[in-house]
């Protein structure tokens, strides 16, 4: 029991550190930009920027939970975005058929990479490092070194459109009601089996705070133009993959695989098949991110996705995924993506040189990994 209490404190500490650090950098950026950082227009733009890294982070956190890595997602995202532009603009393929082909392409790449890692037992680092180079070359080959533009409106909506103000309020209220219902059900279940629960006053207070945060975000976004469609796509994926990772047998199995691969193998879990599925899902996330990025840019560009795999890894690790495998949450990766996007956005508004942005993000990644190692050692 003592160990369980300690682990809970570690989790809370990580959350508090992230929230505290986020508040500090927001205050700093607000001061250095004369308050422009906190304008609703900039916050809306910030959420659009984080959506792409957030989608990549969803797939990446699943891969990291299994104890593996994927260095190719940024290049794969760029290559699939370039493929979409070539198919749609140069070859006249319809927008929806283009999207379908790109999604299937992401799944196929994930199938190939996952099979090589799982069945041929080539280290994930080597396979995906090779993929990084291959997909970067594929993108240059597809685009012939030039930007391919423009897309039609039915494609651009996935990167540029906004959900109307009325629908944002409807979605916000619906989200509050669903969360309250889920928390009530969880509380009743714990009480039924005689588990300890918080006081009723604390329960009410927690749900009120959650709903106020949701409604506050809705108000901020509606003050500009509404909810960006890329953010809506990301939120839908968060709900789906949170359910998959936390409420399904497959989700529990990938945590077990990351915790102890050999024990999972001997316990009857189909570890090799599940690892292939994880990489297929990760490939599909790269495809979705490629669609959003190309739609946002209104073009397929030869430099798209460069270094984005590092942002995705950083988002997952900052959000609590352990590089040793076995722990991590989809929602944590989204928080990590928001943190990284805040750094990018604020430093850009301050006109900080690009090389400093790379240095700062690199330092943040190192500190996040150190914090993970330190927490794991303290919990033993």
Image (cartoon, rainbow, N blue to C red):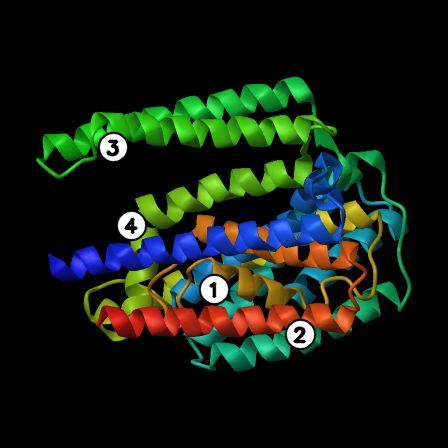
- Which sits in the foreground, 252 or 102? 252
Residue highlighted by disc 2:
359
Q: Do labels 4 and 2 touch, CB within 8 Å? A: no
* Label located before the other in sequence (1 or 2): 1
* Label located before the other in sequence (4 or 3): 3
Residue highlighted by disc 1:
317
Residue highlighted by disc 3:
186
Disc 1, SS = helix
> Which disc number belongs to residue 249?
4
Disc 4, SS = helix
Is the N terminus in the top left, top right, bottom left or bottom right quadrant? bottom left
Is the C terminus in the top left, top right, bottom left or bottom right quadrant? bottom left
Q: Residue at x 58, y 62 (%)?
A: 312
* Label located before the other in sequence (1 or 3): 3
Q: Distance between the residues labelled 3 and 2?
A: 43 Å
Q: In the image, is residue 4 above or below residue 190?
A: below
Please name which of the two marks, 4 or 3, marks the residue nearer to the observer.
3
* Label located before the other in sequence (4 or 2): 4
Q: How far apart are marks 1 and 4 (CA)?
A: 24 Å
Determine the image quadrant of residue 191: top left
């Amino acid at each position: 029991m003592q160990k369980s209490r300690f682990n809970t404190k570690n989790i809370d500490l990580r959350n508090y550190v992230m929230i505290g650090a986020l508040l500090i950098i927001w205050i700093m950026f607000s001061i250095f930009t004369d308050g422009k950082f906190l304008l609703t227009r900039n916050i809306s733009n910030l959420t659009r920027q984080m959506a792409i890294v957030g989608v990549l982070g969803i797939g990446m956190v699943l891969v990291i939970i299994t104890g593996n890595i994927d260095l190719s997602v940024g290049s794969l995202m760029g290559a699939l975005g370039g493929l979409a532009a070539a198919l749609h603009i140069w070859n006249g393929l319809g927008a929806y058929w283009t999207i379908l082909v790109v999604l299937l392409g992401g799944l196929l790449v994930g199938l190939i990479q996952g099979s090589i890692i799982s069945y041929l037992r080539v280290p994930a680092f080597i396979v995906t490092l090779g993929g990084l180079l291959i997909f970067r070359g594929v993108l240059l080959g597809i685009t012939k070194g030039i930007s391919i533009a423009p897309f039609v409106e039915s494609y651009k909506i996935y990167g540029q459109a906004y959900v109307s103000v009325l629908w944002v309020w409807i979605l916000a209220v619906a989200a509050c009601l669903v969360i309250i219902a889920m928390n009530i059900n969880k509380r009743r279940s714990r009480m039924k089996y005689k588990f300890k629960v918080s006081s009723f006053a604390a329960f009410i207070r927690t749900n009120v705070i959650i709903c106020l945060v949701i409604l506050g975000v809705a108000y901020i976004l509606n003050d500009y133009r509404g909810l960006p469609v890329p953010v809506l796509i990301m939120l839908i994926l968060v709900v789906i993959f949170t359910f998959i990772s936390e409420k399904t047998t497959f989700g529990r199995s990938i945590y077990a695989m990351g915790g102890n691969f050999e024990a999972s193998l001997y316990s009857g879990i189909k570890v090799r098949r599940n690892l292939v599925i994880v990489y297929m899902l990760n490939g599909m996330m790269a495809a979705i991110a490629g669609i959003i990025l190309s739609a946002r840019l209104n073009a397929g560009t030869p430099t798209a996705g460069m270094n984005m795999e590092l942002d995705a890894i950083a988002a997952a690790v900052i959000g609590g995924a352990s590089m040793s495998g076995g722990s991590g949450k989809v929602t944590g990766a989204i928080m990590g993506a928001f943190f990284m996007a805040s750094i990018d956005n604020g430093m850009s508004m301050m006109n900080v040189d690009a090389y400093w942005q790379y240095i700062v993000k690199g330092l943040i990644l190192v500190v996040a990994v150190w914090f993970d190692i330190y927490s794991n050692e303290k919990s033993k």
